[in-house]
Amino acid sequence: MSILVVGSVAYDTVETPFGRAERVLGGSASFFAVAAAFFARVNLVGVVGHDFGEEQLAAFRGRTIDLEGLERMDGKTFHWQGKYSYDLNARDTICTDLNVFELFKPRIPESYRSSRLVFLGNIDPVLQREVLAQVDRPQVVGCDTMNFWIEGKRDELLKTLAEVDVLLINDSEARELSGEWNMTKAARAIRALGPQTLVIKKGEHGVVMFTDAGCFSAPAYPLEEVFDPTGAGDTFAGGFMGYLARAKTLDDETLRRAIIMGSTLASFCVEAFSLDRLVTLQRSEIDNRFLLFKRLTHFESI
Ligand code: AMP
């Protein structure tokens, strides 16, 4: 079972009230791949520049992550800089240096084309469709997007969404995409655009999933220390899709467990800068926290 991910591989500079990290490994595909590789083989498609070193690649080595699709171009690696205040749900983007990412044209290696699941990271919706055109029909197509594309390339995004099974976006993006303030109405409008499963992320307030079977809500794990939320959404997606890759059927029970698995992985991501916590994470720690989630959300009927 393998998952194809297409997205950014980046240098991030991040400032939080608790510290600063300069040019550390980031990017949507990086967080996704390391999280998903706990469950399945991950085929990574992205681009880096000549300045991307072996030290950064080390995060991917020794895992079930295939790097044949990680292109190296002449130029500098994509660099993103963000700053958080004490409200860690909100961040300011200080700068986005696209560098080699500006010329990125995803080329899917032959051996990746039969990947059973595909995750389209937050890139131009035209490129997202070009990825789908290069693969055999996957069982699940997951997709992320952002306000930039909702505002700037709405028509292209709508065409992409028609080909997507699971859309993972945050609450403000859901409102903007649907034009509805109410989340339930927003979910109905977005699901009518294509994605049968809609996962709305609400940062430290957890996630809500909408499917044909109804609605499922999960809190974020109550951590005492949240250090850096960067990458939490992509890590969530990695845990979610990774769990689905292992599942025999994609019924509502499976999707619910996948939501908790995504939340579990994301809860580790935010404990440290960059992928620092994810690269030391053990499978036993994931299983323990998954069980704590069950206790956290369990209640008896009256
Ligand atoms: P998240 O916190 O899940 O939204 O993801 C943060 C990651 O997305 C960072 O590691 C950034 O490198 C990456 N990122 C930020 N802006 C963009 C962008 N415009 N395109 C692609 N990746 C981005």
Image (spheres, rainbow, N blue to C red):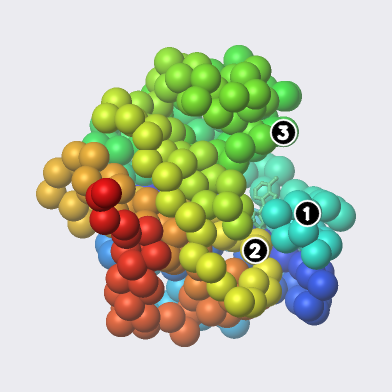
| Disc 3: which residue | 148
Q: Is mark 1 within 8 Å of ligand 1?
A: yes
Q: Earlier in the sequence, mark 3 or mark 1?
A: 1
Q: Is residue 201 above or below residue 138?
A: below
Q: Earlier in the sequence, mark 2 or mark 1?
A: 1
Q: CA distance from mark 3 to mark 2?
A: 20 Å
Instruction: For mark 3, give the secondary structure.
Output: helix
Mark 3 near ligand 1 (CB under 8 Å)?
yes
Q: Position of residue 15 (x, y in %)?
A: 81, 69
Q: Residue at x 61, y 77 (%)?
A: 224
Alpha carbon separation for disc pair 3 and 1:
15 Å
Give the x, y percent position of residue 81.
80, 60
Where in the figure is residue 104, as x and y percent of width and height?
62, 44
Q: Name the residue at the right extreme.
A: 94
Residue annotated with mark 2: 229
Separation (CA) of disc 2 from disc 1? 9 Å
